[in-house]
Amino acid sequence: MCMNPSSWYYPSFIALCLYGAWGYWGTRASSFINPLSITFYSSIGVLISGIIALVLLDFKLDLCPKGSAYGLLNGLASGVACIFFIAALRNGPTMPVVLVTSMYPMITLLLSVVFLKQGLTFKHGLGMVFAILALILFATE
């Protein structure tokens, strides 16, 4: 089966690589500073990317209360998750910590099924079961 690159494929691959770098840099930082300090410095990085986005938008943000609230919640969840991720890296081995936290898309999928009423096919469900089995196999000794 050949994958036909479309408008979502390349951005997804770039995000995958950047999330991988994010996890690696978090691991490296945790060797030197505490999780709250890492979160502060990480937030500066997010602020810089926010300024770049604002410039690319020509300083014309979409103004919608619901969209803005979800955007703020997105940032808050990311920042708090970063604190717990770095704390886990400081207290445990990188392999299982990264594997467990890399399952976050499954939470997104489940929330989308429950709250957005998006469909879940048998194949998707089977993939989720295999992902959980892989997590168990990788994360246990």
Image (cartoon, grey):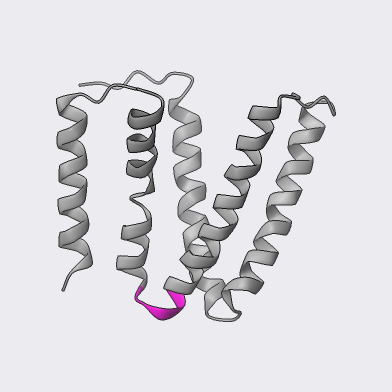
Q: Quadrant of the N terminus?
A: top left
Name the image quarter holding the C terminus: bottom left
Residue at 46% x, 78% y: name it: 90
Q: In the rendered view, does 131 fall on the left or right side of 34?
A: left
Which one is nearer the viewer's eye here, 5 or 75? 75
Compared with 61, 130 (above or below) is below
The residue sitting at 35% across, 35% down in the picture is 109
As drawn, the residue found furthest toward the right would be 59
Snapshot quadrant of residue 57: top right
The correct choice, above or below, for 5 with respect to 101 in the image is above
Instruction: Decide whether the magenta segment is chiefly helix, strand or loop.
Output: helix
Quick one: 141 or 9, which is closer to the camera? 141
Please provide percent x and percent y for residue 33: 61, 79
Specify the segment rendered in magenta: 89-93
Q: How far across and down, in percent of the image, does residue 104 sit?
A: 38, 48
Image spot of residue 93 (x, y percent): 34, 75
Q: Is residue 107 above or below residue 115?
A: below
- Seen in the image, is 103 located left or right of residue 84? left
Q: Is residue 117 left or right of residue 40?
A: left
